[in-house]
Image (cartoon, helix red, strand yellow):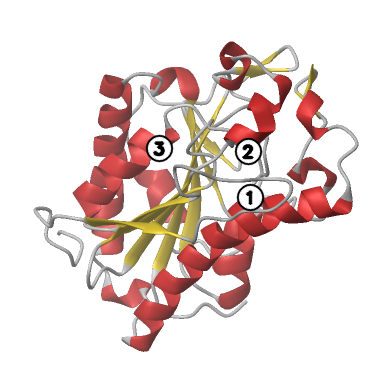
Amino acid sequence: MRPPQPRSRVLMTHRSGQMVSSNVISFVAPDPVEMHVADGSRVILTCDHASNRVPRALSRLGLDDGVLAQHIGWDIGAAAVTRHLATRLGASAVLAGYSRLVIDCNRDPDDPSSIPAVSDDVAIPGNRGLADDERHARQTAIFEPYHRAVARLIDAAMVRHIVPALISVHSFTPSLGGQVRPWHVGILWDGDGRIPTPLLAALRDDAALMVGDNEPYSAREPAGYTVRHHALEHGLPHVAIEIRQDEIADAAGATAWAERLAAALEPILAMDSLYRLWQK
């Protein structure tokens, strides 16, 4: 069975958010949100760490391009998977336009890791000793437009009396802190198993894949801000997907994984019974 939207749908691309200027950040391009709208879609994809861009005024946070290209700067390959998956599923999608090192769109703004001074033992000079107004400027310019865009898509679906499903796409580095992470993909969830349980089963049908259940991260510690704030707290069907970065570091790998995920997700997303509010 297919999801409710035709595969051939052409997604309209919109840019969300006003150009924001302050004494801290002046954006010239691009906008902080990349938003793809599929009219009538019941599925919303999010990609919190889609980009490693840094606003010009922040001078790359004192880092060279090689550091920003590493996993600390973004989720390598996640944006390409998200865009391809959106096309396959006929889904809407919201992708963050700036590096997680500027401000992490998947962390509460008052969490110290929201604007890290150190990431995976790499010092981030441009994040040291930030004043409250500097932190607030980043939140206003980047974090808030991203989450308003997600909320708008959810609200638009609810106005149509549709409870949308939210799928959050991430990637993870093959090793961290000297520990090898063998999983090819991880499915993150907490309580609501409507998408995660059948998705885990479908992916595990491929004996060549090592599929993590709340690995290498757990959504129970707690779930990231996007899933928690937009889906879990409101009972929307949802799942977070983590793909190992060496699997999707090039276009061929990203396309292959998007196709694999689409094949696993399509029967799940085709079930009308999915689109209901979940009660704990």
The reply, left or right, for residue 1 in relation to residue 197 is: left
The amino acid type of the residue labelled 3 equals Ala
Name the residue: 72% across, 54% down.
137
The amino acid type of the residue labelled 2 equals Arg
**Residue 99 coordinates in the image, percent (x, y):** 58, 36
Q: Is residue 27 above or below residue 43?
A: above
Q: Earlier in the sequence, mark 2 or mark 1?
A: 2
* Cα–Cα gap, marks 1 and 3: 15 Å
Q: Are marks 2 and 1 in contact (CB under 8 Å)?
A: yes
Identify the residue position indicated by label 3 in the image. 79
Name the residue: 54% across, 75% down.
235
Query: Is 228 in front, or is 95?
Result: 95
Identify the residue position indicated by label 2 in the image. 100
Q: Earlier in the sequence, mark 3 or mark 2?
A: 3
Q: Which label sits on residue 106?
A: 1
Q: Is residue 263 visible?
A: yes
Query: Is 8 in front, or is 208?
Result: 8
Determine the secondary structure under disc 1: loop
The amino acid type of the residue labelled 1 equals Asn
